[in-house]
Image (spheres, helix red, strand yellow):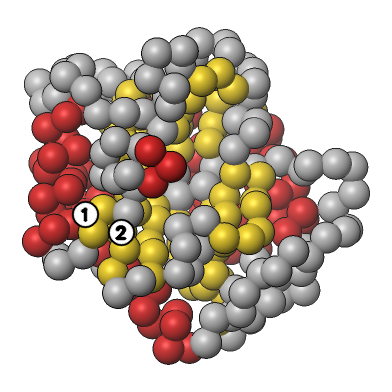
Amino acid sequence: MAISIKKPLEIEKLRVSNSYVAQTLNHLRTYVRAGMSLAHINQMGEEFIASLDARPAFKGLYGFPAGVCTSLNEVIIHGIPSDTVVQEGDILGLDIGVERDGWYGDAAITLAIGKISDDDQKLIDCSYDALMHAISVIKPGMRFKELSLELENFIHDRGFVPLKGFCGHGIGRKPHEEPEIPNYLDGKNAKQGPKIKNGMVFCIEPMICQKSGIATIDDVDKWSVRSEDGLRGSHYEHTVAVIGNKAEILSVE
């Protein structure tokens, strides 16, 4: 497994791309309302990215048709924008990638549309809090498997389960690089595998299910990922760089 170590100048390039991701997500957070279609929300995101003189990195990636993953309610990740209109009480995951000058940024949020149920708020809080917990414990010498176990334990402690088969990842001149970072321990031994080092840049993205972590992929669009339990899920993501023996969030304004 070849996990690249980024030079300080390269991390600054990644900081720019990731700041554009954060700006786009914050723009959508401000303007998305009940009554908007998922296609309109995607258009807003793509146009905002273009206004930054950057490129929506997901559009065309592996054949994905849009710049914004719009994952509504039971769709946990990889939702395709459509004419579906968001309603009061929905929860909407927005996952965005940006490429600028050959460097990639990536982050995701889950939005409450108007007033949502307490249970849905707990679901959203779990993904966000798991993300921030994971970032807080990162240090050089820690194994990535230990980080995955931290995520899994945090999610289980909140009464939820992680989505299986999908993961966080390295990022740089490609949108997905080594390593893969599941939100659960893959195998039985967390004390094996590659260690985190200063200069590494990667995405952490808790994907939360309610009862079952077994994923299903939509038979029609071939992209939308749900849990086999058919219940709502949530997703948050940041890109972080390990600098000065701790993780620094790059995907912020």
| Kind of residue sitting beneath label 2 | Val
Give the left or right position of residue 140, taking residue 63 as reference: right
Q: Position of residue 219 (x, y in %)?
A: 46, 13
Question: What residue is disc 2 on?
Answer: 98
| Kind of residue sitting beneath label 1 | Thr
In which quarter of the view is residue 178 placed? bottom right
Secondary structure beneath disc 1?
helix
Residue ID at (45%, 50%): 237
Q: Residues within 10 Å of mark 1 (few under 14, many from 20)?
A: many
Q: Is residue 36 above or below residue 246?
A: above
State the count of labels.
2
Q: Residues within 10 Å of mark 2 (few under 14, many from 20)?
A: many
Q: Which mark is residue 24?
A: 1
Chain-order first, disc 2 or disc 1: 1
In which quarter of the view is residue 73 placed? top left
Asked if the residues shown at circle 2 and circle 1 are in contact, with their CB atoms under 8 angstroms apart, the answer is: yes
Q: Position of residue 218 (x, y in %)?
A: 45, 16
Q: Is residue 217 above or below residue 77?
A: above
Secondary structure beneath disc 2?
strand
Q: How far is the residue under mark 2 from the one under mark 1? A: 9 Å
The answer to whether residue 64 is seen in the rendering is: yes
Give the left or right position of residue 253, taking residue 246 as reference: left
